[in-house]
Structure formats: C-alpha cells, structure tokens
C-alpha cells in the first residue's frame, strides 16, 4: 500500500520491484495506491515500478478491511486471501528476509 506523495514509499518501491522480479512465477505483487486513479497513473508513468498498481481511493472499505494505519505498508496475503503478516513503514533488511522466508514457506506448502 502506497501513497504517491510519500518519500518512504518512494524508498520502498525498489524493494517491492525486486521481490516482484525474483518471485514472478510464484506470486503476484500488486501495489495499492491510496490516491486517485489520475494521480496514481501519473505516478506510475514517472516510475519504473515493475508490478501492477491500482487505486483504492474509490473503495473506502479497503483501508478499514485491511486495517491500513500508514504507508508504506507491505501485506503478505496467502492464496486464500488470508493476511499472513503486514509490515508498516520502510522494510528493513531483516523484514525483507522474513517476508521472503514466509513467501518461500507458503509456496512450499502450496506445491
């Protein structure tokens, strides 16, 4: 989950892109912008994002349903739509490793 005006989201984009590139056969990475569709389109046109980005501004239930408390927020959702874990803020190296380990464990269970 990202904001088009958030410097912390900007710093997290390369991490998300790397995860998307390294796991494109095993999972889907989807960025969810909290801004309007027009602002989101302008933002992704100016960035080399590397994954799909949608706008959730018109769906006010999104933030409530997933309890979004800040951006950037990285949410790992399993194949059944269940949130496995969420990280708020810029991802640390330890959190990136944890995320990748959880993704690998989830992939191993589904195979």
Image (cartoon, rainbow, N blue to C red):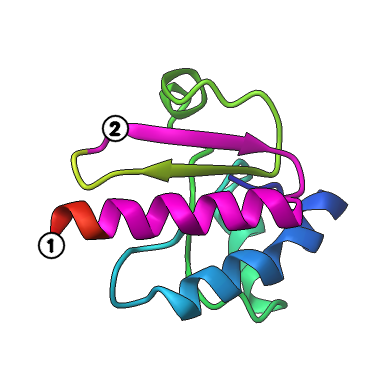
Q: Is residue 93 visible?
A: yes
Q: Is residue 70 above or below residue 49?
A: above
Q: Position of residue 20 (x, y in %)?
A: 48, 72
- Asked if residue 26 lies left or right of residue 91, the reply is left
- Asked if residue 32 lies left or right of residue 103, the reply is right
Q: Quadrant of the C terminus?
A: bottom left
Circle 1 is placed at which residue position?
A: 111
Residue closer to the observer: 30 or 58: 30
**SS for dot 1:** loop
Circle nearer the N terminus (2, 1) = 2
Mark seen at residue 44: none
Does 104 appear in magenta? yes
The magenta segment = 81-107
Circle 2 is placed at which residue position?
A: 82
Residue closer to the observer: 6 or 60: 6
- The residue shown at (39%, 35%) is 84
- The residue shown at (50%, 59%) is 100
Q: Is residue 9 above or below residue 41?
A: above
């Amino acid at each position: 989950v990202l904001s088009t005006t958030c410097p912390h989201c900007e710093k997290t984009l390369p991490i998300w892109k790397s995860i998307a590139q390294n796991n494109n056969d095993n999972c889907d990475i989807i960025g969810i912008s909290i801004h309007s569709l027009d602002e989101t389109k302008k933002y992704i046109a100016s960035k080399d994002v590397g994954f799909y980005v949608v706008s959730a501004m018109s769906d006010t239930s999104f933030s409530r349903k997933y309890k979004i408390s800040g951006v950037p927020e990285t949410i790992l959702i399993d194949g059944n739509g269940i949130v496995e874990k969420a990280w708020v803020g810029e991802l640390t190296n330890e959190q990136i490793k944890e995320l990748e380990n959880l993704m690998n464990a989830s992939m191993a269970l589904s195979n």
